[in-house]
Image (cartoon, grey):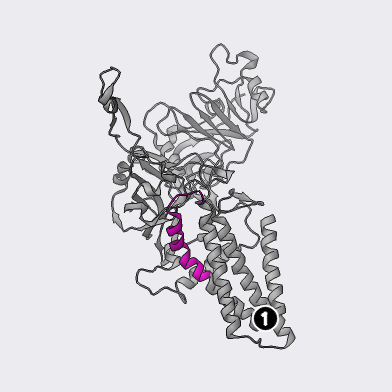
């Protein structure tokens, strides 16, 4: 809020100043501001790359300082030239003179403050300043895919976005560069307002440390892209990029969050940029001794250890603020594969890693082939079919109202966690994580909860998403995991339908792992995948159940994520447990 008020006050002050100076003077100043901004955005990166060289103690200051300095110098020179070319003002009647001057001043103020916001965004400082946090990675949410998110409380007037949008339009129209090899801003570096904060969203978080945020253009030694059909209106794009030591973090290694990687291209004639959902890399090389168990001496000391060649790709999702693509060692180039989910018809132009860009052209491939090449064999399509029969995974009545296998909390545990039980020792509400108990410690008699309370006339339905009995991810779990990662949006609504097309959202879930049990029941609204704060892990022994409350006697028909039918249910009638 403070940043918003300061920005609005500055724009208002500039508008007021030029309304007093008159329409003609305000128009000349507006032209100077537009040209100064265009010059700054055109010269900013070339100057920066010459001075920065990807390292140095001023690496966190130079990007923003150079952009602002070029803008200020260009504006002063253009203002001086305008004053010499038109020393006398042209006067209009007082009211039009003030009103038109104020309008031109308002536009000048918007562009000036917008450039200042973008420039200060590229300066070493905390991610959040004076109550304003720009674009950042989605973290701390179950669906965290490394995707970027707009400000939670953005500027009241987005001067930076308006300014960048204005110059992107000019760069592809009136001020489109005609020099050989020149590229419009809108094509090569779109959404600069977003990048001014995303570039600072690093491992250091809000500490204000930027780490490595800039690379020379030559840092990306090679890049190629492959694309395949995916699900619905999306396609999978995998970009393999090799970064040499000149692009490492102060020449010590490479640590890349999803916020510093994006693919730029066009879809339906419009330039768009997308950040990766996951990546793969080779594991670190292992050391092996060649000294036969003896202490090496003399010239043999340097040969006592050799590096074993790393075997196979390791695939990871950008699933929060702790996930970073890294270089296996600090001795040479790092080759990383980034997975992007982009709309059908997307044509990639560039892969951008920090400030370095390299042109790419996508080749066609198969989805399974791409996932295998990334080491993501568990995400290869194993015949999973949306809409398959899941009746065997659905239960109701007494079986559904009991806790899932492995849950051994006592009534006292539930009460201490803030849960509520009725006189029958059935849970009314709970939202907590419980540690497992041994058989001797588990509740019995009055300490043993009977299960979940269900309102009169209602029935509890339990859907087994993951049973924990197989090393392979079962179909239903795979669909939910895929929804989190690639196939469906994370805000997809979870709905259980009956034969009359009525639907219900979950009222709870259970996640039972080897080390803990997470139980949520009637304590919080669950509408979408986003609301499931705990999820099963791929390739684990986790057990995961969804809980629904429906009218007794309901004929169940389908489980859906948004409009996608995940599974059909045949001949299942929701029954109430017998008290």
Q: Is residue 69 above or below residue 204?
A: below
Q: Residue furthest top?
A: 440
Q: Magenta residues, as a range?
A: 37-58
Pinpoint residue 145: horizontal percent, then vertical percent.
Answer: 47, 45
- The residue located at (55%, 69%) in the rendering is 73
Q: Is residue 568 visible?
A: no
Q: Pick the residue in front: 214 or 163.
A: 214
Quarter of the image that includes the C terminus: top right
The residue labelled by disc 1 is 100
- The residue located at (29%, 28%) in the rendering is 302
Q: In this rendering, would 332 be left or right of 400? A: left
Q: Is residue 197 above or below residue 95?
A: above
Q: In this rendering, would 255 be left or right of 206? A: left
Pinpoint residue 77: horizontal percent, then vertical percent.
Answer: 56, 74
**Most frequent secondary structure within the magenta stretch:** helix
Q: Is residue 553 visible?
A: yes
Q: Pick the residue in front: 338 or 446.
A: 338
Q: Is residue 157 above or below residue 428?
A: below
Pinpoint residue 85: horizontal percent, then vertical percent.
Answer: 57, 85
Answer whether residue 63 is magenta in the image.
no
- The residue located at (38%, 69%) in the rendering is 182
């Amino acid at each position: 809020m403070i940043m918003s008020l300061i920005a609005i006050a500055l724009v208002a002050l500039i508008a007021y100043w030029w309304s007093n100076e008159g329409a003609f003077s305000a128009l000349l100043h507006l032209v100077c501001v537009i040209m100064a901004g265009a010059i700054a955005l055109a010269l900013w990166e070339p100057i920066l790359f010459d001075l920065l060289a990807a390292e140095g103690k001023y690496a966190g200051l130079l990007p923003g300082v150079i952009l602002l300095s070029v803008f200020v110098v260009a504006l002063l020179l253009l203002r001086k030239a305008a004053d010499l070319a038109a020393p006398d003002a042209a006067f209009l009647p007082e009211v039009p003179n003030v009103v038109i001057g104020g309008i031109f001043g308002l536009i000048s103020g918007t562009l000036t403050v917008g450039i200042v916001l973008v420039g200060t965004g590229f300066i070493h400082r905390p991610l959040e300043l004076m109550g304003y946090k720009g674009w950042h990675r989605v973290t701390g949410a179950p669906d965290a895919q490394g995707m970027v998110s707009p400000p939670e409380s953005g500027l009241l007037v987005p001067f930076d976005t308006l300014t960048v949008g204005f110059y992107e339009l000019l760069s592809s129209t009136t001020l489109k560069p005609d020099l050989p090899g020149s590229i419009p801003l809108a094509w090569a570096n779109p959404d600069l307002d977003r990048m001014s904060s995303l570039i600072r969203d690093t491992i250091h978080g809000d500490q204000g440390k930027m780490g490595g945020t800039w690379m020379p253009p030559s840092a990306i030694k090679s890049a190629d892209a492959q694309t395949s059909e995916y699900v619905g209106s999306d396609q999978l794009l995998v970009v393999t990029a090799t970064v040499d030591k000149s692009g490492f973090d102060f020449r010590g290694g490479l640590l890349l969050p999803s916020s510093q990687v994006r693919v730029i291209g066009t879809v339906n004639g419009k330039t768009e940029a997308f950040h990766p959902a996951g990546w793969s890399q080779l594991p670190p090389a292992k050391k092996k001794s060649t000294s036969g168990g003896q202490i090496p001496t003399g010239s043999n000391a340097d040969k006592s250890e050799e590096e074993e060649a790393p075997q196979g790709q390791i695939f990871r999702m950008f699933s929060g603020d702790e996930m970073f693509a890294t270089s296996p060692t600090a001795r040479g180039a790092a080759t990383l594969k980034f997975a992007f989910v982009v709309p059908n018809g997307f044509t990639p132009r560039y892969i951008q890693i920090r400030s370095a860009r390299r042109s790419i052209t996508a080749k066609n491939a198969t989805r399974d082939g791409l996932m295998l090449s990334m080491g993501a064999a568990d995400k290869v399509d194993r015949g999973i079919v949306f809409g398959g029969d899941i009746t065997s995974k659905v239960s109701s009545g007494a079986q559904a109202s009991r806790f899932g296998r492995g849950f051994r909390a006592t009534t006292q545990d539930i009460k201490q966690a803030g849960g509520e039980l009725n006189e029958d020792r059935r849970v009314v509400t709970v939202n907590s994580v419980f540690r497992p108990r041994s058989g001797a410690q588990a509740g019995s008699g009055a300490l043993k909860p009977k299960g979940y309370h269900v309102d009169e006339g209602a029935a509890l339905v339990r859907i087994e998403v993951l049973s924990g009995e197989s090393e392979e991810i079962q179909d239903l779990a795979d669909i939910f995991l895929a929804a989190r990662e690639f196939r469906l949006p994370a805000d997809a609504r979870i709905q259980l339908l009956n034969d009359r097309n009525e639907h219900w959202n979950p009222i709870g879930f259970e996640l039972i792992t080897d080390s803990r049990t997470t139980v949520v029941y009637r304590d919080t609204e669950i509408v979408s995948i986003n609301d499931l704060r705990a999820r099963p892990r791929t390739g684990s022994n986790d057990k995961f159940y969804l809980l629904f409350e429906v009218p007794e006697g309901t004929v169940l028909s389908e489980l859906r994520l948004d409009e996608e039918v995940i599974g059909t249910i045949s001949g299942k009638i929701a029954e109430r447990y017998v008290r």
